[in-house]
Image (cartoon, rainbow, N blue to C red):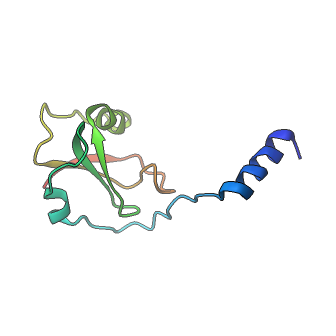
Amino acid sequence: MTNDDNSQEIKKSFFGQVKKIEATGGHTPDLGRLQKPLEGPDSVVRLFCTGCGTYVELTQRGAEIMVRPTNVSLPASLEGNYLKTASCSACDGDDPTVTIEII
């Protein structure tokens, strides 16, 4: 075992390990939840992951980063919309597709 591996094992023994959520797919968003006002002061849109069912508020920069691999252009205003993806940073899915959906 290398020093780095040993260090990782020590960290796990003290702090535990967080596993990514399994992306089972087929989750559908709750439109009532999507229509609620955003909570973060810099949030501009919500993202919903159909892979794991997670909701995340994104800043403008975060939204730009999410759509970059898919060549989707963000509208000037995201009000009344949400981003939908099949995988996110919280889950173990590997589908980078992101679409802009109307609430």
Horizontal and vertical percent position of residue 59: 28, 37
* The one of 89 and 11 positioned closer to us in this rendering: 11
**How many numbered callouts?**
0
Q: Is residue 28 left or right of residue 34?
A: right
Q: Is residue 59 left or right of residue 75?
A: right
* The one of 97 and 92 positioned closer to us in this rendering: 92
Horizontal and vertical percent position of residue 63: 29, 37
Horizontal and vertical percent position of residue 83: 25, 48
Residue sitting farthest toward the front: 14
Q: Is residue 21 left or right of residue 79?
A: right
Q: Residue at x 47, y 57 (%)?
A: 91
Q: Quadrant of the C terminus?
A: bottom left
* The one of 86 and 30 positioned closer to us in this rendering: 30
Horizontal and vertical percent position of residue 64: 30, 33
- Picture quadrant where residue 4 is located: top right
* The one of 43 and 86 positioned closer to us in this rendering: 43
Q: Is residue 74 left or right of residue 23?
A: left
- Picture quadrant where residue 5 is located: top right
Q: Residue at x 15, y 65 (%)?
A: 32
Residue sitting farthest toward the right: 1
Q: Residue at x 89, y 47 (%)?
A: 1
Q: Residue at x 34, y 61 (%)?
A: 50
